[in-house]
Image (spheres, rainbow, N blue to C red):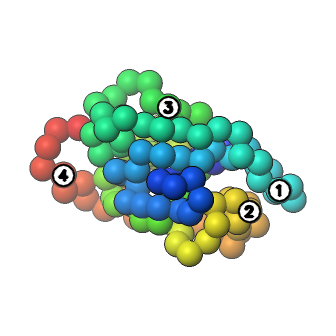
């Protein structure tokens, strides 16, 4: 299973997820240590807040972890088949392992998208 963790410094979990430009990508299965397999650097037009549609570098990720995520982001990820998790004060690999062990769960409330511009 592939995870993307928002991390502007590639060390800690960051948010706001819709504006995040850097992600650590992990491959992980329950019972095994998460393994970092890639790093993604998005340009501003590729951040989910600005993204206009089509293929995206985060496609193929099963779970996205960030420190915070708004309703628009959660809904956009859900439409792409990606589960969103918000967690803070945890190392990226630890957050992936915690999700797999059921210690943290997905954001379920998408809420209203209140963005003032077209996506």
In the image, is 86 to the left or to the right of 63? left
Q: Earlier in the sequence, mark 2 or mark 3?
A: 3
Q: Secondary structure at mark 4?
A: loop
- Whole-angstrom CA distance, mark 2 to mark 3, is 23 Å
The residues tagged by marks 2 and 1 sit, at their Cα atoms, a distance apart of 7 Å
Q: Is tag 3's residue or tag 4's residue first in the polypeptide sequence?
A: 3
Q: Quadrant of the N terminus?
A: top right
Q: Nearer the viewer, mark 4 or mark 1?
A: 1
Horizontal and vertical percent position of residue 14: 47, 61
Q: Say which residue label 3 marks.
A: 57
Cα distance between the residues tagged 3 and 1: 24 Å
- Residue 108 seen in this snapshot: no
Which badge, 2 or 1, comes first in the chain's sequence?
Answer: 1
Residue under the point 31% across and 38% down: 44
Asked whether disc 2 touches disc 1, contact meaning CB atoms under 8 Å apart, the reply is: yes
Tell me the residue that label 4 is attached to.
115
């Amino acid at each position: 299973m592939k995870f993307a963790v928002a991390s502007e410094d590639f060390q800690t979990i960051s948010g706001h997820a819709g504006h995040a430009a850097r992600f650590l990508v992990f491959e992980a299965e329950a019972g095994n240590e998460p393994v970092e397999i890639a790093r993604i650097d998005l340009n501003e037009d590729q951040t989910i807040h600005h993204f206009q549609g089509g293929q995206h570098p985060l496609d193929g990720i099963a779970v996205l972890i960030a420190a915070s995520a708004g309703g628009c982001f959660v809904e956009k990820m859900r439409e792409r088949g990606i589960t969103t998790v918000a967690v803070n004060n945890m190392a990226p690999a630890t957050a992936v392992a915690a999700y797999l062990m059921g210690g943290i769960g997905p954001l379920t409330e998408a809420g209203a998208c209140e963005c003032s511009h077209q996506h």
